[in-house]
Image: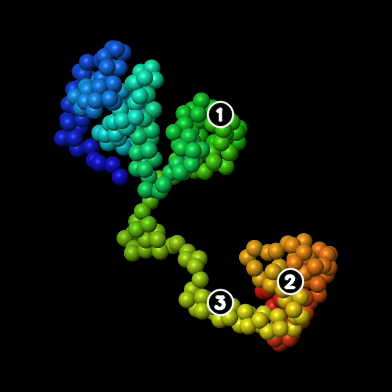
Amino acid sequence: MGSIDTPDTQRANRRYVKEAMSAPLLDPAHELELARRWREDNDEAALHELTTAYLRLVISMAGRFRNYGLPMGDLVQEGNVGLMQAAARFEPDREVRFSTYASWWIRAAIQDYVLRNWSIVRTGTTAAQKSLFFNLRRLRALTGDSGAQHMTPESRQEVSRKLGVREQDVIYMESRLAASDRSLNAPVGEDGESLEWQDLLADTRETPDEIVLSMRDSEIHAGWIAKAMQRLNPREAIIIKERKLRDDSVTLEALGRQLGISKERVRQIEHQALKKLRAAVVDQAGGDPRLLDAYGA
């Protein structure tokens, strides 16, 4: 997560902001000259002057994200990364002001930092979630239900329409922003008991006994199937293997061409062969037909 805003850090941040805001602004011609010197001649002095002039842009952009509970110094630092990325990619001949180009990179760097550090749970992994994360509160205020605990169906529909996202995404982000992180090691209750939240999580995995039984049953079932296949004639065996025992099942038409018979004839033979398999498996299972469902036959 982010660093802590100590008094020393706050003083250093104020000093940094003061120095950044005192840097002279660049006129378009001089900005273009600096950008070309850096781009064409790798002039680091030109790069320093160019980026220093727009540190104020980084500070302004970082200030827009202060409400996410992250230290201002960290936001500025990430914005500076975006500023340097912009300088590395800027092409002077495109006739675009560097400030305009850099704004996108600065904002992207800060937003990525916020998404990575706002919560210990990864947020904003899709474009829709990212858009909702940074716009949901503002749009809720515009719809007039920002003070309510939950959004109304009408508000969700309006947000969904304005951002071009699914209503399900709106519901997910609404609940995500309303919930705070909780450590799984936090104690349950306030009486000092040793029970933690993680102790209440259900383990849905199979137990070792269940895994062993499942493996044993699979071996038994595979043996039954192998013996049952011996009751089929060669053509029936081919059809069952190609249609039922492969991950990528062969079509009736393809099998018909392979065997020199019609598609309908393949279907009839397959049906007859499955009946034989059912009967053979029931015999081996002691005459219990309920086991047929285990084989999909």
Which label is found at residue 214?
3
Point out the tag, 2 or 3, that comes first from the N-terminus: 3
Disc 3 marks a residue whose amino acid type is Ser
User: Secondary structure under badge 3?
Assistant: helix
Q: Is residue 274 above or below residue 249?
A: below
Q: Quadrant of residue 20?
A: top left
Disc 2 marks a residue whose amino acid type is Ile
Whether the residues at callouts 2 and 3 have beta carbons within 8 Å, the answer is no
Q: Quadrant of residue 14?
A: top left
Colour scheme used in the picture?
rainbow
Q: Nearer the viewer, mark 1 or mark 3?
A: 3
Identify the image quadrant of the C terminus.
bottom right
Relative horizontal placement of residue 284, taking residue 200 as reference (left or right): right
Query: Is residue 157 visible to us here?
Result: yes
Relative horizontal placement of residue 67, taking residue 153 as reference (left or right): left
Disc 1 marks a residue whose amino acid type is Lys
Point out the tag, 1 or 2, that comes first from the N-terminus: 1
Q: Nearer the viewer, residue 138 or 77?
A: 77
The x, y position of residue 109, in whole percent, is 35, 34
Residue under circle 1? 162
Dot 1: within a 10 Å radius of its alpha carbon, few (fewer than 14), some, or many (20 or more) residues?
few
The x, y position of residue 128, in whole percent, is 51, 38
Residue under circle 2? 239
What whole-number distance in Å separates the C-alpha atoms at marks 1 and 3? Answer: 51 Å
